[in-house]
Amino acid sequence: MRYNFTFRQIAITNFNRAAVELEQVGADHADLRGFNLLDPYQTLCKLPTIVAWLQQHKLTVDRTAFLHVSKHTHWDIHIDHGSHDVALNLPISGCTNASTHFYKFREEAISTLTKSRGTGLPYLEYYDPNPELVDVYYLTKPAVLNIKMPHSVSNSTDIDRVCLSLRFRQDESFDTWIDSML
Ligand SMILES: [Fe+2]
């Protein structure tokens, strides 16, 4: 695991304006459930305020995921599969009261590569008989999270939780940005 942090809430310039653009992305994909990859170029075309902020930090997006956690749904403890260590999650709707839980990473726990129901996308199921909760966050504002830290998502509210998750090319600009945050 490259980083030890769990999450950091961050400020995005003009996020009120970005929230309106994100709401449109949510409306455009209202039929999606679970974890879905979107076309990064097409998605960012709808998010000029986010793009301006990305340019400010010289960040290159190479993956965009649309996450829809239905009401009264729980996503089990897992580690995100793939080369990215962190994600920037942007709230779209219903994010205030649904929580993400982080657990202590243990080398001896069992990670099994599996496919998510519905979308069939690979992720690492993480099995620890005694998971130790280390942190909890609510996506009330944009947040950077360590997706290699075991985490689960719990939505026991009466509304669906929808957010957009960006993954970046982990180049020099990315390192500078992360270092400024940690
Ligand atoms: Fe995840």
Image: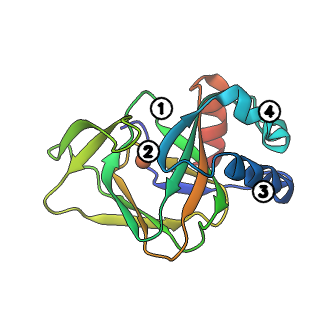
Counting from the top left corner in percent of width and height, residue 174 is at 63, 31
Earlier in the chain: of badge 4 and badge 3, it is 3
Task: Judge whether 59 appears above or below 89 on screen.
Answer: above
Earlier in the chain: of badge 2 and badge 1, it is 1
* Displayed quadrant of residue 79: top left
Residue at left offset 80%, top offset 32%: 55
Residue at left offset 37%, top offset 48%: 149
Q: Helix, strand or loop at disc 4?
A: helix
Q: CA distance from mark 3 to mark 2?
A: 23 Å
Q: Residue furthest top?
A: 171
Q: Helix, strand or loop at disc 1?
A: loop
Q: Amino acid at mark 1?
A: His
Q: Amino acid at mark 2?
A: Ile
Q: Which mark is residue 19?
A: 3
Asked if the beta carbon under badge 1 is closer than 8 A to the nearest atom of ligand 1, the reply is no
Earlier in the chain: of badge 3 and badge 1, it is 3
Which residue corresponds to mark 2?
A: 147
Earlier in the chain: of badge 2 and badge 4, it is 4
Counting from the top left corner in percent of width and height, residue 1 is at 35, 38
Earlier in the chain: of badge 1 and badge 4, it is 4
Q: CA distance from mark 1 to mark 4?
A: 22 Å
Asked if the beta carbon under badge 2 is closer than 8 A to the nearest atom of ligand 1, the reply is yes
**Are the residues at dot 4 and dot 3 in contact (C-beta closer than 8 Å)?**
no
Q: Amino acid at mark 3?
A: Ala
Which residue corresponds to mark 1?
A: 84
Q: Is residue 92 left or right of residue 74?
A: right
Earlier in the chain: of badge 3 and badge 2, it is 3
Q: Which mark is residue 45?
A: 4
Q: CA distance from mark 2 to mark 1?
A: 8 Å
